[in-house]
Image (cartoon, rainbow, N blue to C red):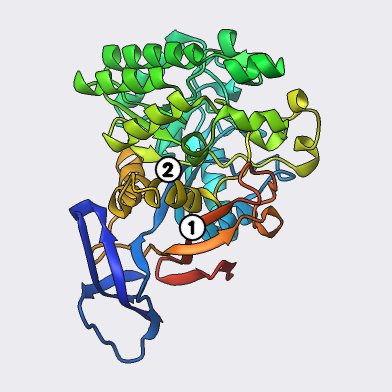
Amino acid sequence: MKLLLKAGRIINPVNNTDEIGDILIMDGKIAEIGPELSCEGAAVYQASGLVIAPGLIDMHVHLREPGLEAKEDIASGTRAAAAGGFTTIACMPNTKPVVDNSILVSGILQRAEDEGVVRVKVIGALSKGQEGKELAEVGDMVYAGAVAISDDGHYVDNAELLLNGLEYLARFDSPIISHAEDEALAGDGFMHEGAVSAMLGIKGRPAVAEDIAVARDILLAEYTGGSVHIAHVSSKGAVELIRQAKKRGVRVTAEVTPHHLALTDDVVATFDTATKVNPPLRSADHLEALLAGLKDGTIDAIACDHAPHAFEEKDREYRFAPSGFAGLETSLGVILTKLYHTGKFTLNEIIERMTAAPARILKLNSGKLEVGVPADLTIIDPDYEWIVDSKRFYTRGKHTPFDGMKLKGKAVATIVNGNLIMQNGEVHE
Ligand code: DOR
């Protein structure tokens, strides 16, 4: 199968290039990149006016399999990824049972081969059953293919467990991904603690709960020499702590979500449960600090924390609804609308944070465009205007705070291993 992408704006953040050209794909790999390519028998994709980027990578996705298939499964979640322009996603272990051993890691990888349409990487749990007590078989899971270890969805309250995990995983050069929110401080709050929570009379989750957890994680990484990745950073204090730690040479990386970059806690006043998420949407001063952190490299990557729930679970009173919502099908559109079309970030910067950065953190051989690498690419129309309609989502999680919002910018084609698996929003088998 040969595919020739013609006259696209090729953006390759790894070597900071941005130029018009062609890409020839043969046998699942990038065969040639250059001007005016031709190839007998190749299918041609006209990409003039479009951006050709390395395939987008989302390192924080809940696929809910095994056990929680009413929310999502590998088939629906990977189709949502393809629709959103993602060629690789990493899935979190807070499933039923929890992914805390190598058999489950292998099982998900096999299911993804059978049922998935994009590449799936697995993140194994840090503690058995994610109970925060006993270290899971983390080394075994890394050998079975886990790209990182995390108790995501839960705060690791037990500092000794985290210390042991960091020390042990340093030998495998594998990061621990931390859901950093001190449970005692944040536990029974439903939104960001601030003026809006006071006005609404909803118990808040204070930003200091995140700051304290991030400070502890950084200190333990520094002490052990291990590597910690802070998931969904949302507080300005956390940004500053990570900035200072990076200056000292601590092995800390971080990600931020599109929703924390685009929305403030004002939207909770609607009592729409699609705005309920952990960590919570915060006030504008935090949002500004996140943008600054993403710009100066304190925050490395953008990841959407795709956290679908069944419709009926979310369709209830605010405090009883589960936290989280779907993100894969809106992530790129939200980022382009809020970061690119406002002039705050260049396309090159955005694509770097959605490709090369997560590839670097998870040590994946992707996120770049060069001859010989597997042909995972995303074709983007940065000016395409559309309105989010969750009824048309591939994900089972139909709740999103972006429903009905007008966005500018969208993936128009997703290519995995040389196969065009999504075109104009339609995912092909
Ligand atoms: O809102 C959230 N939902 N935050 C998380 O960290 C976990 C996620 C989930 O699994 O539903």
Relative to the observer, which residue lies in front, 325 or 240? 240
Left or right of 27 in this view: 251: left
Please state the horizontal and vertical placement of residue 296, each as a whole percent of the image. Answer: 26, 34
- Whether disc 1's CB lies below 8 Å from ligand 1 is answered no
Question: Which numbered disc covers residue 139?
Answer: none
Displayed-image quarter of ligand 1: top right
Residue at the spot 62% in from the left edge and 20% down from the top edge? 196
Please state the horizontal and vertical placement of residue 394, each as a whole percent of the image. Answer: 64, 57
Labels 2, 1: front one? 1
Residue at the spot 63% in from the left edge and 35% down from the top edge? 324
Left or right of 392 in this view: 25: left
Q: In which quadrant is the C terminus drawn? A: bottom right
- Crowdedness of circle 1 by 10 Å Cα count: few (<14), some, many (20+)? many
Q: Which residue is mark 1?
A: 408
Callout 1: SS: strand
Please state the horizontal and vertical placement of residue 337, each as a whole percent of the image. Answer: 46, 51
Q: Which residue is mark 2?
A: 145
Above or below residue 104? Residue 189 is above
Callout 2: SS: loop
Residue at the spot 22% in from the left edge and 83% down from the top edge? 36
Instruction: Inspect this view and state whether residue 292 appears.
Output: yes
Relative to the observer, which residue lies in front, 294 or 43? 294
Cα gap from disc 2 to disc 1, whole angstroms: 37 Å
Please state the horizontal and vertical placement of residue 249, each as a whole percent of the image. Answer: 20, 22
Residue at the spot 70% in from the left edge and 40% down from the top edge? 309
